[in-house]
Amino acid sequence: MDEMETLLEQMIVQQRGKVLAIARSPNARLTEDDILSPQDFPELAESARFNYEDGLLAGLLSAQIAIRARRREKGG
């Protein structure tokens, strides 16, 4: 289970970097905090590529939360 969580964390870090890089391509001044509210930036809200990659990140984060919750349920 630890190996799976480590792998998932590595995937999340990589995907966060990818999402930020995509966000910064039209607007280099965007920060990690900015991309948490993409609706505030029309260039992000309208970008299919950004929304797709951000959705993948959301899925990875959901999986991480589910794994951690299951681990706590089982007492470990």
Image: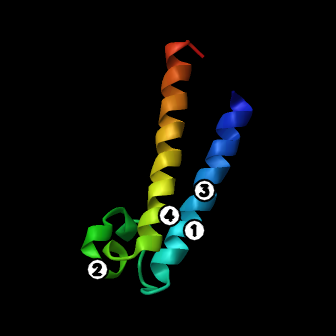
Callout 3: SS: helix
The numbered dot on residue 53 is: 4
State yes or no: discs 4 and 2 in contact (Cβ < 8 Å).
Answer: no
Q: Nearer the viewer, mark 3 or mark 4?
A: 4
Q: Position of residue 41 (x, y in %)?
A: 29, 77
Q: Residue at coordinates 45% horizontally, 51% vertically from top-left?
A: 58
The numbered dot on residue 42 is: 2
State yes or no: discs 1 and 3 in contact (Cβ < 8 Å).
Answer: no
Q: Nearer the viewer, mark 1 or mark 3?
A: 1
Q: Nearer the viewer, mark 4 or mark 1?
A: 4
The residue most toward the top is 75
Residue picked out by circle 1: 18
Q: CA distance from mark 1 to mark 3?
A: 9 Å
**For the C terminus, which image quadrant?**
top right
Mark 1 closeness class: few <14, some 14–19, many ≥20 residues within 10 Å: some
Residue picked out by circle 3: 13
**Residue 75: quadrant of the picture:** top right
Q: Amino acid at mark 1?
A: Lys
Q: Amino acid at mark 2?
A: Pro
Is residue 42 found left or right of 17 in the rendered image? left
Is residue 12 found left or right of 50 in the rendered image? right
Q: CA distance from mark 4 to mark 1?
A: 8 Å
Callout 2: SS: helix
State yes or no: discs 4 and 1 in contact (Cβ < 8 Å).
Answer: yes
Q: Relative to 66, say whether 76 is above or below.
A: above
Q: Residue at coordinates 48% horizontally, 47% vertically from top-left?
A: 59
Q: Relative to 23, say whether 3 is above or below.
A: above
Image color mode: rainbow
Pick whichever, 4 or 32, lies toward us.
4
Query: In terms of sequence position, does the residue under pointer 4 or pointer 2 come before the other?
Result: 2
Q: Relative to 3, say whether 43 is above or below.
A: below
